[in-house]
Image (tube, rainbow, N blue to C red):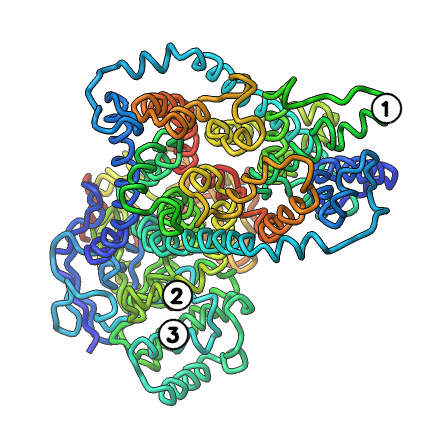
Amino acid sequence: MGEIVLSEVKKSFGGVSIIQGIDLTIDDGEFAVFVGPSGCGKSTLLRLIAGLEDTSSGTISIDGHDATRLPPARRGLAMVFQSYALYPHMSVRKNIAFPLRMAGMPQDEQARKVEAAAKVLNLTPYLDRRPGQLSGGQRQRVAIGRAIVREPSAFLFDEPLSNLDAALRVSMRQEISELHRSLKTTMVYVTHDQVEAMTMADKIVVLNAGRIEQVGSPLELYKSPANLFVAGFIGSPKMNFIAGAEAAKHGVHTIGVRPEHIVLAADGPWKGVVGLAEHLGSDTFLKVQVDGIGPLTVRAGGEVGLNYGDTVGLAPQAGKLHRFDEGGRAVAG
Amino acid sequence: MARNVSTGRKAAVTALAWGVGLVIFFPILWTVLTSFKTEGEAINAHPSFLFFDWTLENYHTVNERSDYLAHFWNSVVIALGSTLIGLLIAIPAAWSMAFVPGKRTKDLLMWMLSTKMMPAVGVLVPIYLLARDTGLLDSKTGLVIVLTLVNLPIIVWMLYTYFKEIPGEILEAARMDGASLGSEILYVLTPMAVPGIASTLLLNVILAWNESFWTLNLTAANSAPLTAFIASYSSPEGLFYAKLSAASTMAIAPILILGWFSQKQLVRGLTFGAVK
Amino acid sequence: MATQASQTASRLMLSPAVLLLFLWMIVPLGMTIYFSFLRFNLLMPGTEAFTGFENYVYFFTDPAFWPALANTLTLVLGVLFITVIGGVALAVLLDQPMWGQGIVRVLVIAPFFVMPSVSALVWKNMLMNPVNGLFAAFARGLGLEPFDFFADAPLASIIVIVAWQWLPFATLILLTAMQSLDREQMEAAEMDGAGPFWRFLHLTVPHLTRATTVVVLIQTIFLLSVFAEILVTTNGGPGTASTTLTFLVYMQSMLQFDVGLGSAGGIVAVILANIVAIFLMRMIGKNLEA
């Protein structure tokens, strides 16, 4: 139903190449997340799939049909925008019904579908309000409602949670995940937040400078990042990178070790002084200045009685070391 | 800024501001008052401010002169006609420039503006001759055409600045929802832009109503709007002050009222968005 | 940033406006330039002939030209002086807390909406008339000889009328600019111990500079074309005492039917206006990028 296949897709604006040749298959029913720093081309890629921009070259096929030249309205996709893009002059009911009205669906059928969608999204009491009278989370749900009534072959989300506060973001994240589980429709989701990517995705596509750095499931990316970029982007706090003599001991240009994979050990190979200790209760994050290596971030579980100026010994967990060559590519083993 | 200002200071400022405001408004107030006087009272060597015999006679006289109403009607047709046609041409143009900006959009906007900078007197002769040769001299059609073109840059600019404030994502959402270009403009853009379109309409009706170069130079008896008709009053000195005042009051009243509604838009329209 | 389809639609929708304005600009201007090189009088049809720069020579050597140029500059500068100074003062005044601010604002703005022929007539007959005008009645009340404004100071009288019409515009724009002044910046300066005069000079005035420039440039464009006020009050006289360039061109082409000469004058006016326009366009253009 909702398989999306991109091949050799390129896009440039006025000579500046934004998307530099993307080959990607998003399987039917899959939740795919495009993630990357701002300016990496993830939103442009989504807009290319939506048909809001033309590809400069390459093809996009949806449901097995070539959709490269189709206008957005005829691609059978629905999109949820960052700003929600609700029609401010229409009631919630009319907003949700708009795509049905454009499709020329009979009035009574429209009403039935809108009621059904409103029920799923807990919007029934608000159907006659204007978007301006709703909270951020409710607006988000209206935007989703407008997308689901069309029964599209795939949903596109463009950073839909970035305008919400932290608590709401967590609950909307869960709602979208649940929606995906119940609808089983393909979803393509763009975010710059790797936590959203990790928690929601079946498949994460890490983009950087208009190229795909790596495609894989959240844990694949976490466990075996293909390169320095993915290693640094996935995981929070960031992976520590160590170059120079210490890396040379492992026979590579750079080694990486995640903060949660460093243990406090008085007899550890690395000795350092605590520069900053963040006590969160559940975790303690330490910035440790290690002799001959530089600053390392360490995640110690629970409450740890270390403070500024204390001397500690550190040891990387066995087998959790990542090794990278001069070009930044991961070296196996 | 919620802040306490001493009552004394506020009273002083109020008195000063009201004083200045009334001085500036006085010529209009005086015209309105005179319109209710008899002709004799109007030229009284010791003018009376409020204590005179109020009369509506001047308004009756002016209204009975059928030509006054004809000229009033000319003003309405010319002001509304040129503005509506202008909007019809400008809405699609402003849509294009606001939502599908290209490399040359900025140059295009500046060029449109530059046509507004051309002094009317520079093209007086050819426009006069063209109007004469096409039989459009002293016709409402001719004036509507000229005023449409004169005010088109302002209309495009005003609409452009209003359209710019509508997020493009909403129009894209409509496109994703299956709306054609026509539906997008009709069901989504236009309803959202109604306040901006209304302000543009208002300001341009005012500008066209008061336009006094082309209306004076391209019309004679038949299609003269109020600007030209009232200018022709300038000869019979002294005798018709009260009737002149009544005619003037009726000519400026509708626009004063519209103008008070459009203060904010006025700034935006006349500065081409340079001051907000 | 859009699809091919929407770009095509965009071009289609843009073209009527562009085409019409292009014609409106190029055709009459081209004709004016062409006429300006012809001997062409509507009273003598059939005698049209190419004369080179003769019309320009005539226009510049016309005894009315230099007075008209001087009058134009006096009118523009005089009105600008009054409206900018008055506008800043009024904007500062209206920005203060007071009772009935909305009504005062309305009173101050009103003259802008009065059509030029009405304001000219009202000032000419009811206020400035030496026999029946209100000012004359005041003068007599004080035991003074009434002043014949349009005979003795025609240009100054016109400047007063035009300034009265444009003062609201300057006030409104400066007031709008004033209200966009950053209140936090003002309060920060106050916290730092800056007095009200210092704040006016160092925060308000620089903030208003931009708006003032816009006022000056836009008013100049309109003031160069002042017409109805002169036609209704003095008809350019006495002599050439209140003839401006615009009015001179009007007289030559519409009263003397000398199309060639009028066109040459029109082109001179276009060039003058363009000098101002270039500065204005630069300012607006800068704003467009921001």
Indicate which disc residue A146 carries.
3
| Residue A35, visible in the rendered structure | yes
Q: How crowded is mark 3: few (under 14 residues within 10 Å), some or many (20 or more)?
A: many
Task: Determine whether B202 is above or below B115 in the image.
Answer: below
Q: Mark 2 lies on which chain?
A: B
Q: Marks 1 and 3, how far apart in space?
A: 77 Å
- The type of residue carrying mark 2 is Val
Q: Which chain carries label 1?
A: C
Residue B1, percent from left and from top: 71, 44
Residue C154, percent from left and from top: 61, 21
Name the residue: 83% across, 41% down: B48
- Quarter-of-image position of residue C74: top right
Task: Determine whether A329 is above or below C262 in the image.
Answer: below
Indicate which disc residue B188 carries.
2
Q: Which chain carries label 3?
A: A
Quadrant assignment for the C terminus of chain C: top left
Indicate which disc residue C142 carries.
1
- Quarter-of-image position of residue A225: bottom left
Q: Which of marks 3 and 2 is in front?
A: 2
Q: Give the secondary structure at mark 1.
A: loop
